[in-house]
């Protein structure tokens, strides 16, 4: 209560007067209610704004011959597989070239360190992200997020190829 | 001589300004808050460090849940009716006034367009009980692209502003479905997407 009732002292022996009623309204419940509503609306207002991550896919080239060919030395491939597994290799996979496949994970010490090291080594790196059909959407967002965290300039979502799948199988990782 | 007594006052507080302020704020928040409408399915979004906010309106939301279903949501109060008219014309269906009104209140849905009429006739309670199978995205029966294209056209006609396309996928949604949705849109030269995510703190990266 905002008002503290005071016992009226010093009226002993005096003439009994009619008690003056105060016209003041106790506003405490109203304040309580107002702040309750306020808290509720503040909380709901700030909580339902979702965040978005921008994803810009490359424009489809009409004739595939005109596309620039990616140099093997600039290429870096990330393969995403089931059970949150992550593989990567440097260079391009070709008929006669079998790059060394390495296993990594989504933690800060995993692929992020590799990406940063690679970036220092070759700033022109183009990262090919190949999500397997068995990987989930969370993995895809996580890896795109890593691209943002490590400030990669060139990366693309690419379909996984047969050769990539065979590489994973033969590597035994 | 009597002792001089200090005049006793009631220690009362005037709360009127506080009440004024509190109600002013309440009014402000009440008017600005937009309630999150209920989705047809629970979609648990992954988190990312991106801190871009989703725009308030003119969004086409494509929900992908963990059972490979795709749902369509459109946030534009003015163009929603127009969109339904366009779809009705395209699939030679007709919707009555009540169904149109319900479509305006519908946040997202995932049924083939042929079943949309019966879905819209239901009450909100009934609709919650129905399991919706998702919008067909097969190459033979691709209704999703019609919804997206017509929604873009409707929005352009109604308020002449571009629409954003936001993909809201579940943590366990499979990449194949998401990629298929992206593929479908890319076929129509839509190359920019927003992926709806939760916020996560950006880690410090040493170089």
Image (tube, rainbow, N blue to C red):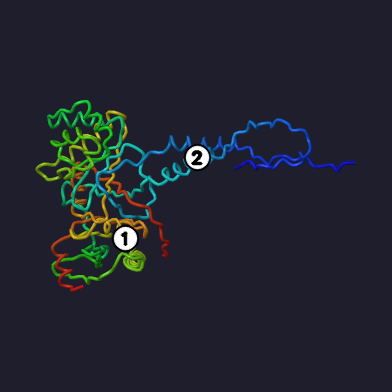
Q: Estimate the spatial distance between the alpha carbons at disc 1 and disc 2, rounded to whole Å.
A: 60 Å
Q: Earlier in the sequence, mark 1 or mark 2?
A: 2
Residue that appears at 24% across and 39% down: B125
Task: Name, please, the residue furthest toward the front.
Answer: A13
Location of residue A170 by image quarter: bottom left
Q: Is residue A12 left or right of residue A38?
A: right
Q: Which residue is mark 2?
A: A33
Crowdedness near tag 1: few (<14), some (14–19) or many (≥20) residues, C-alpha within 10 Å: some
The chain identifier of the residue carrying mark 1 reads: A
Q: Which residue is mark 1?
A: A124
Disc 1 is placed on an element classified as: loop
Q: Nearer the viewer, residue A165 or A163?
A: A165
Q: Nearer the viewer, residue B116 or B20?
A: B20
Image position, residue A78 (x, y; %)? 25, 63
Image position, residue A66 (x, y; %)? 18, 50
Residue that appears at 30% across and 42% down: B38
Q: Is residue A73 left or right of residue B13?
A: left
Above/below status of B180 relative to A90: above
Disc 2 is placed on an element classified as: helix
Q: Nearer the viewer, residue A24 or B176?
A: A24
Image position, residue B22 (x, y; %)? 53, 38
Task: Name, please, the residue furthest toward the right.
Answer: B1
Which quadrant: the C terminus of chain B?
Answer: bottom left
Residue that appears at 29% across and 28% down: B158
Q: Is residue B19 left or right of residue B5?
A: left
Task: Name, please, the residue furthest toward the left.
Answer: B140
Location of residue A46 by image quarter: top left
The chain identifier of the residue carrying mark 2 reads: A
Task: Name, please, the residue furthest toward the top.
Answer: B97
Above/below status of A46 relative to A142: above
């Amino acid at each position: 209560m905002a008002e503290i009732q005071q016992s009226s002292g010093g009226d002993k022996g005096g003439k009994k007067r009619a008690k003056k009623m105060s016209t003041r309204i106790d506003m405490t419940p109203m304040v309580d209610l107002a702040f309750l509503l306020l808290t509720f609306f503040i909380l709901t207002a700030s909580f339902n704004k979702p965040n978005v991550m921008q994803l810009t896919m490359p424009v489809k080239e009409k004739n595939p011959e005109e596309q620039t060919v990616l140099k093997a030395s600039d290429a870096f491939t990330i393969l995403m597989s089931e059970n949150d597994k992550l593989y990567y290799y440097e260079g391009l996979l070709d008929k006669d070239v079998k790059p060394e496949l390495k296993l990594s994970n989504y933690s800060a010490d995993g692929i992020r360190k590799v990406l940063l090291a690679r970036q220092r080594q070759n700033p022109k790196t183009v990262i090919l992200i190949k999500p397997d059909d068995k990987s989930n959407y969370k993995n895809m967002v996580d890896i795109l997020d890593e691209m943002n965290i490590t400030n990669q300039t060139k990366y693309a979502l690419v379909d996984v190829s047969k050769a990539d799948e065979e590489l994973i199988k033969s590597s035994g990782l | 001589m009597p002792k001089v007594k200090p005049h006793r006052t009631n220690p009362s507080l005037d709360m009127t300004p506080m009440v004024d302020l509190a109600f002013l704020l309440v009014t402000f928040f009440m008017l600005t808050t937009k309630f999150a409408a209920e989705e047809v399915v629970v979609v648990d979004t992954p988190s990312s460090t991106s801190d871009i906010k989703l725009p308030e309106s003119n969004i086409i939301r494509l929900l992908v849940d963990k059972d490979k279903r795709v749902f369509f949501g459109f946030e534009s109060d003015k163009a929603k009716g127009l969109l339904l008219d366009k779809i009705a014309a395209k699939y030679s269906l007709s919707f009555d006034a009540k169904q149109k009104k319900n479509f305006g209140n519908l946040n997202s849905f995932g049924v083939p367009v042929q079943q949309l009429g019966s879905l819209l006739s239901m009450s909100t309670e009934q609709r919650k009980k129905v399991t919706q199978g998702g919008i067909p995205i097969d190459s033979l029966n691709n209704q999703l692209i019609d919804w997206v294209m017509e929604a873009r056209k409707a929005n352009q006609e109604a308020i002449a502003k571009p629409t954003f396309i936001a993909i809201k996928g579940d943590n366990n949604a499979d990449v194949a479905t998401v990629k298929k949705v992206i593929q479908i849109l890319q076929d129509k030269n839509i190359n920019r997407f927003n992926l709806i995510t939760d916020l996560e703190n950006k880690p410090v990266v040493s170089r």
